[in-house]
Image: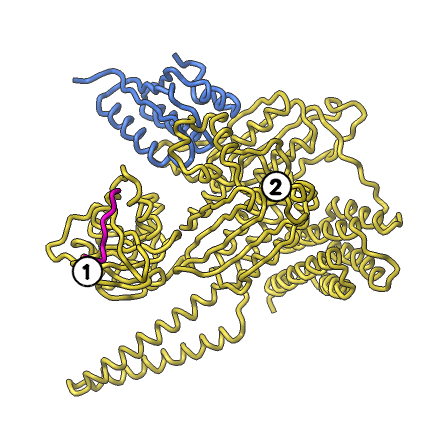
Chain colours: A yellow, B blue
Amino acid sequence: MDTRALLDSFIMESLDHVDALEQALLQMRNQGDPECVHVAFRAVHSIKGSCSTFGLSHLSEFSHDVEDTLDRLRTGELCVNRDLSSALLDAVDLLRTLLSAASHGQDEAVPDCAQVLSRIAQASGQQGAASKTVQGSAPHATWRIRISPSDEALLVAEPLTVIAGLSSLGNLSSRCLGNVPPLEAFDPNRCYVHWDLTLEGGEEAEVRDWLDWLEDGGDVHLEPLGASQGTPGAQPTAPTQATPARSGKADRDLKQHQSRSIRVEVDKVDGLMNMLGELVIDQAMLKELVAGFTPAKLEALHDAIASLEEDTRALQSAVMRLRMLPASVLLQRLPRLVDDLSTTLGKEVDLVVEGERTEIDKRVLEELADPLTHMIRNALDHGLESPLERQQRGKPRRGTLRVSAFHRGGFVNVEVADDGRGLNTEEIVASACRKGLMTEDEARLVDVHELIFAAGLTTAERVTDVSGRGVGMDVVRRNIEVLGGTIGVSSEPGRGCKLTVRLPLTLAIMDGQLVRVGDETYVVPVLSIVESVRARECRVRPLPSGMSVLHFRDGDVPVIDVHKVLGVPPSDRPGRGLMVVAEADRGLLALTVDELLGQQQIVLKSLKQNYGNVPGISAATILGNGQVSMILDVHSLAQLARSPDRPTPSLRSREASVPHGLSSKLAH
Amino acid sequence: MTSDKRSFELPPDLRHATCAELRQGLLQAIEEATAQAASELEIDARRVRWIDTGGLQLLLSLRCTCQQRGIRLAWRHASDELLRACWRAGASERLGLGEQT
């Protein structure tokens, strides 16, 4: 059997064991559950057991030492304390790093192993398990820093902000390197440049604090420039080699490894096989019908085609389901994150996780991990008060952080809500004005809460290694928008803040309702449609603002005139009050259309690569007749309608009709 | 009528989100300068207040385009924010910002 396949399988299984180990250690620490030590022991034992098969001696030795400590916990020789569980959690991180290296066929000694084992030994009250002494981190006077952002770095990081931060630590000299193409070939989303920096001043921890902001945006190397230039008596922490600023690269490698494969329940595969069988039968029926076709068999031919259509749809749905994973894959990482952060910040937090079984497209799930981490960091650092402050405000000492995943309106929604102090709107405006992001006059005209997504804005009184540099929420929004999603914020002073991320259910196929607006054919996502109505005039009431509302199910629903919003000329066959009532972020909306044309499954084609963001339009599709049709973004249409000086989107369905190669410009 | 100089005023915001649109404007200015056989493209940068890596790259790309087409890139009234950011990023020399008028 292929050794590579076996190794991949081992890595996947071991990662599961590491997850189980992490969960067990957290439960041991937080709930004192003695049973968890057995779970933790078994997990490490399983990893160690298979290492020798693949010649991974260093991983095997490290697992053995960790297993040893867990065995002593199991037998009662040792007791769990916070230091020991923290050291064991560090070991969990290191196991992931070693597994990442193993996935590339590497099994080399990692200096951190000695450090972690030493910490475990110290926390266990014994010395000698790790004989190598660990040198403390020392301040250094001069640093050489190389920042090499990845091609996609601008979507997750902002190197100039980091360089500005580094310059605050001392005398910084920078060289901006890399070839930037001429404007014709320039891609605004791609990062072409890298930096070679020399920093005189700053301690290693301070420098690394800033560099950590680039953790997912490429590679960073930090090295002291000669021991003689360092602080007298200090020893370099990395004497000969540049060291990665963090284990970010290992995490990325691991993510890449995981994203190449997907685990599928056997039931799903069985279902797929059944559907494939049905398709083979359909094909045989059609072949037979066509071979001996007579007009009398027309009805049977229709039936066979209908059966083929139904089975194709079922197969498509089943294949799509293969990509759907439960949100727990993402949410199960949160207890560790919250635990670490709350310890660092000295806060007491109860984490409530809801909707772990909500199914989300694998890619969406993977891309959501970093934004979610940023959101939680912000909630814990800025949102939740310290235990003492909460008591003074008459709140329970422990704050609550609620993370929920659920489906609504054809989208996946992920909410992060805290019961902290809420957004301080006055301070946000003051900070924005101080930083020159806007004037006080301009501030009166904007939604202040939205300012938290502005680049560079922070209201934190001090910068911590958790948050506070104003780098984060703008990147979060950018990442979410790249996935075709949106992020919104609501806040109540003294009661908390809630961030809501809305993402497409899948990035590939959806059910669409075709509608005619003027002479154009647009698509409305079926999942967002509540009802289609032909409203009598008495049910539509104009408002002084120029907008109208539809009286619908005992409430008023804003009417969006799609003709006007998208700049489509009126039809000579008007819809006479025909409206599609659809669900948007902030409630229902009634879209005026001229005709309902039918429903069909549509394959989403992104417009972003060639046309950028088109307001009111989320993507395009190619219909059965070959025509390109635009998919309406209900939420964005509402924003467009509210904007008094809205630009008219320049892309219409008819303008983009195929063939002649346009379909190839619409990326998947 | 032809002119030896074509001017372009940069907006206050030179950040990633605005780069796609600004790229189009700069391309148009370059095309016009080329069509007019202008020898110089004068960039008025007095309004620039915010610049990030995306914006910096766009300016480097503009410089590269001008060099390829034999058009001199001249800076006029570069704002303090722009000068500071480019100096800190080690890109002032590449952009010719030391030569601004």
Callouts 1 and 2 close, C-beta under 8 Å: no
Q: Kindly indicate whether the residues beneath marks 1 and 2 are on one polypeptide chain.
A: yes
Q: Secondary structure at mark 1?
A: loop
Task: Give the mark nearest the N terminus, 1 or 2.
Answer: 2
Answer whether residue A651 is visible to the viewer in this image: no
* Location of residue A199 in the rendering, given as x and y in whole percent from the top left corner: 63, 24
Name the chain letter of the residue that bears numbered label 2.
A
Amino acid of disc 2 = Asp
- Rendered position, A511 above or below B83: below
- Rendered position, A112 above or below A358: above
Q: Nearer the viewer, mark 1 or mark 2?
A: 1
- Rendered position, A518 above or below A141: below
Residue for badge 1: A536
The boundaries of the magenta stretch are A538-545
Front residue (pair A534, A208): A534
| Residue A540 in magenta stretch | yes
